[in-house]
Image (cartoon, rainbow, N blue to C red):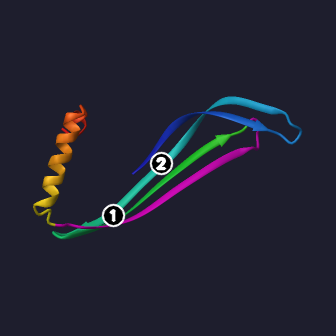
Amino acid sequence: MASFNADVSYIKEKTDINTQHAFWKFNPNMKAKGAIGYNSENWGIAFSYVSNRLFFKGMEGDSRYLNYNDNYKLMYARRIDAGKTIPKITRFAGKVINKIGLGFLIN
């Protein structure tokens, strides 16, 4: 999946001779996501990739700034039997959260 979006940026530049330019700019950005995985009854594995490309253009015609952020994630999950202890703990935590008035977050 890929998407293009627009970003409003505030850019402040300083030159070698201590002059300063500050301005607002409208810039396009690109984001790409991909994932692949497999799961069975007892375990699962997945790999995901997220890429963000941020583009900025300065006051001068030849000054361009690019910011690349790439994230890779490998996930392995194993299913466990909750038994009797984990449901007791989650019920107790739910009662506490409801009592302090934040029950809308979990219900």
Q: Is residue 73 left or right of residue 18?
A: left
The magenta stretch spans residue 63? yes
Q: Which residue: 54% across, 35% down?
A: 7
Q: Can residue 60 be seen in this view?
A: no
The magenta stretch spans residue 77? yes
Magenta span: 59-80
Instruction: Give the amino acid at mark 1.
Output: Ile
Which residue lies under the disc numbered 1? Answer: 36
Label 1: how many Cα within 10 Å (few below 14, some 14–19, many 20+): few
Q: In which quarter of the image is residue 9?
A: top right
Label 2: how many Cα within 10 Å (few below 14, some 14–19, many 20+): some
Residue 71 at x, y = what percent?
48, 58
Residue 16 at x, y = what percent?
86, 42
Image quadrant containing the C terminus? top left
Q: Can residue 78 be seen in this view?
A: yes
Q: In which quarter of the image is residue 18?
A: top right
Q: Is residue 27 left or right of residue 50?
A: right
Rendered view: 25 above or below 80: above
Q: List the single residue furthest toward the right.
A: 17
Give whichever of 34, 107 is nearer the camera: 107
Q: Of label 1 and label 2, which has the lower sequence position?
A: 2
Q: Which residue: 11% across, 63% down?
A: 83
Which residue lies under the disc numbered 2? Answer: 31
Q: Which residue: 83% across, 40% down?
A: 15
Residue 88 at x, y = what percent?
13, 53
Residue 11 at x, y = what percent?
68, 35
Give whichever of 52, 96 is nearer the camera: 96
Main SS, magenta region, reads: strand
